[in-house]
Image (cartoon, grey):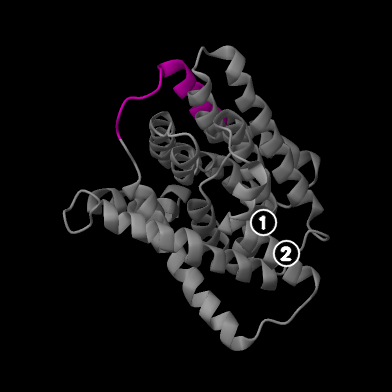
């Protein structure tokens, strides 16, 4: 079966969320509540459980972690380059800056789970645990610098950062996870992937808000340049084919819809971010299967 057909159900859920959001029964208040449930409860439960009980640890997965950091830091540097390439208002640049390296975690975990099952989910969760603090420090730091907000309080309140730190600490300390707690967290985490993809679709906004040149630059950076960087770094660091696929999934997924939420909360400049997220998500339906097919 082709990669495109394997990934079709995940993108179908995104389309389903976009269609449902146009119905009166599923209004903005419904999606706002669902998004908060996923972001503050369901998704942190998935991250914590996967990191706390996963077979992968930072100690025995250094090549994977190093690859993740390599393409993410490259994305941050190249995204910052846009400041000198385009004449964007400082507020718009600060908001769009994150779209060059932030990743759609819901889609990344769903694709890894679909292609490799529990082992793939554990591996990509490790990458999420390492990268979530990095990308949030970069994104929040730029927006805080522009909007006058304080970086540390914004990071401390981030539920994904807290869940990843707690999960990694639990794993490092080798603490047992009680069976009852594991079952509850597993149920919550399982719901997060489906609802997360539906909310991704509901958040898509077809509107104008960014000039063509920066739109092409940031979209190409996230969907073309970062996967290429992941391939180069992965080969240099000797990743196995399975882990190379996981690294490529993380690098090739589009920017996260939460980038729009963050921009709105910290600066009110969400419109150009919405354009980037929507364009990237639509384009990823083509580019992601191509990347994964080319490296099988």
Residue 168 image offset from top left, x and y in percent? 72, 64
Q: Position of residue 63 (x, y in %)?
A: 79, 49
Q: Which residues are magenta?
A: 206-221
Give the image location of residue 91, x and y in percent: 50, 25
Foreground: 261 or 212?
261
Query: Is 49 or 136 nearer to us in this picture?
Result: 136
Q: Are marks 2 and 1 in contact (CB under 8 Å)?
A: yes
Asked if the stretch drawn in magenta spans residue 150, the answer is: no
Residue at horizontal 76 percent and vertical 63 percent from the top: 57
Horizontal relation, residue 35 to residue 168: left or right: left
Residue toward you, 27 or 116 = 27
Q: Is residue 83 visible?
A: yes
Alpha carbon distance from label 2 to label 1: 7 Å
- Callout 2: few (<14), some (14-19), or many (20+) C-alpha neighbours within 10 Å? many
Up/down of 119 relative to 13, above or below: below
* Element on which disc 1 rests: helix
Asked which quadrant contains residue 169, the reply is bottom right
Residue bearing mark 1:
129
Residue bearing mark 2: 168
- The residue sitting at 64% across, 60% down in the picture is 162
Disc assigned to residue 228: none
Secondary structure beneath dot 2 equals: helix
Residue 227 seen in the figure: no
Left or right position of 211 against 153: left
Residue 138 in the image: x percent, y percent? Answer: 65, 37
């Amino acid at each position: 079966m082709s990669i495109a057909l394997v990934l079709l159900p995940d993108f179908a859920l995104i389309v389903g969320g976009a269609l449902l959001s146009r119905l009166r029964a599923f209004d903005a208040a419904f999606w706002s509540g669902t998004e908060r449930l996923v972001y503050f409860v369901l998704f942190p439960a998935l991250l914590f459980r996967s990191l706390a009980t996963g077979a992968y640890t930072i100690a025995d997965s250094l090549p994977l972690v190093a690859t993740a950091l390599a393409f993410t830091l490259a994305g941050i540097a190249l995204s910052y380059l846009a400041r000198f390439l385009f004449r964007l208002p400082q507020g718009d640049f600060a908001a769009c800056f994150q779209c060059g390296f932030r990743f759609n975690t819901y889609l990344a975990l769903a694709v890894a789970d679909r292609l490799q099952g529990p082992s793939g989910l554990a591996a990509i969760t490790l990458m999420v645990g390492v990268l979530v603090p990095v990308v949030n420090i970069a994104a929040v730091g730029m927006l805080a610098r522009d909007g006058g907000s304080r970086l540390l309080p914004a990071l401390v309140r981030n539920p994904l950062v807290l869940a990843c730190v707690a999960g990694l600490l639990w794993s490092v300390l080798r603490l047992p996870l009680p069976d009852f707690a594991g079952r509850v967290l597993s149920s919550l985490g399982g719901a997060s992937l489906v609802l997360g993809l539906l909310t991704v679709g509901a958040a898509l906004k077809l509107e104008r808000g960014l000039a063509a040149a920066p739109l092409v630059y940031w979209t190409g950076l996230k969907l073309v340049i970062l996967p290429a960087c992941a391939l180069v770094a992965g080969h240099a660091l000797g990743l196995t084919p399975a882990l190379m696929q996981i690294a490529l999934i993380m690098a090739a997924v589009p920017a996260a819809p939460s980038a729009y939420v963050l921009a709105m909360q910290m600066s009110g400049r969400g419109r150009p971010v919405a354009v980037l997220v929507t364009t990237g998500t639509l384009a990823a339906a083509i580019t992601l299967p191509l990347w994964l097919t080319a490296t099988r």
